[in-house]
C-alpha cells in the first residue's frame, strides 16, 4: 500500500472551519431556595424598599404588578450612550429597573451558574481570562411584551457575553430565540422555571456571545421576570487549568497540518487568513488602532488554538475597506499616529491618500514593513467599513462591533515541513519519505527563483 497523500486543499479546510460548531451559548436550570429568591427594590428616589420572593410558590401576578409599578418602560440602546437610548414600543415592549434600583439575593457566582457559563463560552480560550458578571437590569415582560431581533450594545471593549436569568413565575410565551429566527436555540423558559417532577421553583438561565442576534417572543399570559448581566472579560492571575474538548481541535489540527504540507500552498511562505465568525467591540473614535487584547469566541478561538499548536502565531487584525480598495493593518500601540503617516483613520477611510496595497506588517517592526506577505484566505474576510461603523462615526458613538480577521504566518515550505517533522515525529513514518522528497523539491525551486525574488520582494501582488 502506498503512503497516504499528505495534502489537503484550502477548500477542505474552509469547509471544515465553517462546519465545526463550537457552542456559542449555554443554558440550564438551578433550584432556587427561599434564601436566594428575594428581590429587594425601591421606587427610584424613594428610600422604602419592598421585597418579593420568587421562591414563594404562592407568588401572584398582583405581587409582580408592584414590581411593574416601580419600573420604567424599557428603552434600548444605540451605542453605549444613555442619551441615545430609544423608547420605541414597536421594537421593545417591556418594563425595566436599573441595577441601582434593585438587589437580588440570588448570587450568580456562588450558585455555580458562572462556572458553567465560563466553561462553555471560554471553551478554547487561554485559562488566564474569566468572565465578570455585572448585573445590568431587571426586566418584566407582561402579556404582549416582546423584544425584536437585536444584538446587545457593545458596552466597553471587554463586553463578551450576555447572561439572562429567568426567575420562576407562571407564564406562557416569551421565548428567547438565539440566532436568526431561533436557529441556534429556542429557549422557552416558561416551561423550565418549575421542576418538571416536583414543581419546585427554579431559575432558568441562558448565556450567549453578545454579538449573536436574539429576540424575545411575545408573552401571552402572566409575567416573565428576568435579571440580565453583562459578562465582561477580565484577566486573572490564577490560570485555570482547562480540559479542552479534544475532538474538533484534533481534526482541525490534522487538516491544517495537511494544508501546510501541500507544496502548492504558499511554497515561499506568507500567511493564512481567516475571517472571524464573531464580531468584537471596537472603539470607533480611536484613530490610532489599538491592540486587540480580548479573548476570541467559539470557533474563532478554536482556529487560533489550532494555529498555535502548529507553530503558526495567530494575530488578530482588522481589514479596512473603502470603495473597492482594502488594506489590512495591524494594531499600533496607540500613540496618536496612524500607520499611514500623519493621516487619521477617518481621513484614511474617507479616501484621501488611501493606500490600497494590502500588506501585513511584520510583527517585529513598529512601522509597516516593506515586506508584504501574500495571504491565502481560508475563510472569507469581512470589511470593517460597515454601515454600522460609518453610522457610529457620524453619530458620535463610542463603540461598535467590528469585523476582524486572524492571520497566521506560514513559513516557506522547507522550514515549515522541518518544524512539523520535529514537533510531530510520527509524521515521517506516516508519509514514508515523501516529506524529504518534498523538502528537496521545494529547496530546488527556491534556489531557481532567488534572483527574481529579490527584485520584486517589495511589490508582490496578491
Ligand atoms: O430577556 C431575555 O431573554 C433577553 C433580553 C434581551 O435581549 C436584552 O435585555 O437585551
Ligand atoms: Fe439583548
Image (spheres, rainbow, N blue to C red):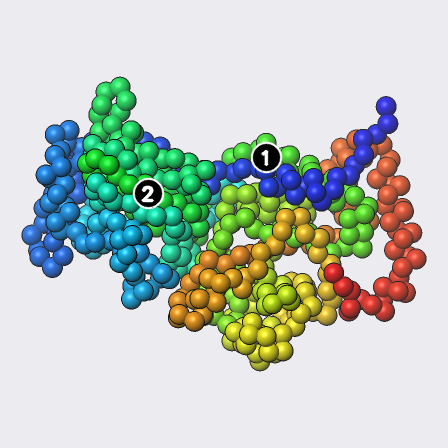
Location of residue 245 in the rendering, given as x and y in whole percent from the top left corner: 54, 34
Question: Which residue corresponds to the image point at 12% horizontal and 34% vertical from the top-left?
Answer: 60
Residue under circle 1?
Answer: 248
Q: In the rendered view, tell whether residue 52 sits above or below residue 288.
A: above
Please indicate, yes or no, whether residue 423 appears anywhere in the rendered image. Answer: no
The answer to whether residue 419 is left or right of residue 242 is right
Q: In the rendered view, tell whether residue 234 sits above or below residue 167.
A: below
Question: Which residue corresponds to the image point at 82% horizontal and 46% vertical from the top-left?
Answer: 263
Which quadrant, please, contains the C terminus?
bottom right
Dot label at residue 49 = none
Q: In the rendered view, tell whether residue 25 sits above or below residue 158.
A: above
* Front in this rendered view, residue 74 or 244: 74
* Front in this rendered view, residue 437 or 426: 437
Q: Determine which quarter of the picture holds residue 317.
A: bottom right
The answer to whether residue 353 is left or right of residue 156 is right
Residue under circle 2?
Answer: 216
Amino acid at each position: 500500500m502506498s503512503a497516504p497523500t499528505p495534502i489537503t486543499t484550502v477548500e477542505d479546510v474552509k469547509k471544515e472551519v465553517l462546519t465545526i460548531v463550537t457552542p456559542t451559548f449555554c443554558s440550564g436550570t438551578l433550584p432556587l431556595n427561599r434564601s436566594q429568591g428575594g428581590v429587594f427594590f425601591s421606587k427610584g428616589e424613594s428610600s422604602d424598599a419592598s421585597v418579593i420572593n420568587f421562591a414563594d410558590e404562592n407568588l401572584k401576578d398582583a405581587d409582580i404588578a408592584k414590581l411593574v409599578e416601580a419600573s420604567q418602560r424599557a428603552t434600548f440602546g444605540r451605542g453605549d450612550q444613555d442619551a441615545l437610548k430609544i423608547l420605541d414600543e414597536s421594537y421593545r415592549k417591556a418594563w425595566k429597573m436599573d441595577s441601582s434600583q434593585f438587589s437580588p439575593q440570588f448570587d450568580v457566582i456562588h450558585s455555580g451558574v458562572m462556572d458553567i457559563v465560563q466553561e462553555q463560552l471560554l471553551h478554547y480560550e487561554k485559562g488566564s481570562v474569566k468572565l465578570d458578571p455585572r448585573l445590568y437590569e431587571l426586566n418584566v415582560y407582561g402579556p404582549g411584551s416582546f423584544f425584536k431581533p437585536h444584538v446587545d450594545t457593545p458596552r466597553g471593549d471587554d463586553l463578551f457575553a450576555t447572561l439572562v436569568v429567568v426567575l420562576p413565575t407562571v407564564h406562557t410565551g416569551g421565548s428567547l430565540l438565539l440566532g436568526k429566527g431561533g436557529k441556534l436555540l429556542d429557549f422557552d423558559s416558561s416551561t423550565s422555571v418549575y421542576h418538571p417532577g416536583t414543581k419546585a421553583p427554579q431559575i432558568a438561565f441562558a448565556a450567549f456571545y453578545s454579538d449573536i442576534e436574539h429576540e424575545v417572543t411575545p408573552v401571552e399570559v402572566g409575567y416573565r421576570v428576568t435579571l440580565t448581566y453583562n459578562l465582561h472579560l477580565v484577566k486573572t492571575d490564577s490560570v485555570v487549568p482547562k480540559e479542552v474538548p479534544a475532538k474538533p481541535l484534533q481534526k482541525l489540527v490534522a487538516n491544517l497540518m495537511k494544508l501546510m504540507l501541500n507544496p502548492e500552498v504558499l511554497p515561499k511562505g506568507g500567511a493564512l487568513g481567516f475571517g472571524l465568525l464573531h464580531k468584537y467591540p471596537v472603539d470607533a473614535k480611536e484613530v490610532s488602532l489599538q491592540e486587540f487584547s480580548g479573548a476570541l469566541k467559539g470557533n474563532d478561538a478554536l482556529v487560533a488554538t489550532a494555529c498555535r499548536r502548529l507553530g503558526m502565531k495567530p494575530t488578530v487584525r482588522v481589514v479596512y475597506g473603502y470603495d473597492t480598495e482594502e488594506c489590512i493593518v495591524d494594531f499600533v500601540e496607540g500613540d496618536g499616529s496612524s500607520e499611514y503617516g500623519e493621516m487619521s483613520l477617518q481621513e484614511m477611510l474617507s479616501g484621501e491618500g488611501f493606500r490600497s496595497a494590502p500588506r501585513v506588517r511584520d510583527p517585529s517592526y513598529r512601522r509597516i514593513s516593506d515586506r508584504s506577505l501574500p495571504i491565502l484566505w481560508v475563510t472569507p474576510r469581512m470589511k470593517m467599513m460597515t454601515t454600522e461603523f460609518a453610522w457610529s462615526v457620524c453619530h458620535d458613538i463610542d463603540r461598535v462591533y467590528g469585523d476582524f480577521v486572524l492571520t497566521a504566518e506560514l513559513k516557506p515550505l522547507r522550514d515549515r515541513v522541518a518544524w512539523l517533522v520535529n514537533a510531530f515525529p510520527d509524521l515521517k513514518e506516516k508519509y514514508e519519505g515523501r516529506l524529504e522528497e518534498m523538502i528537496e523539491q521545494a529547496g530546488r525551486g527556491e534556489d531557481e527563483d532567488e534572483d527574481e525574488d529579490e527584485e520584486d520582494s517589495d511589490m508582490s501582488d496578491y
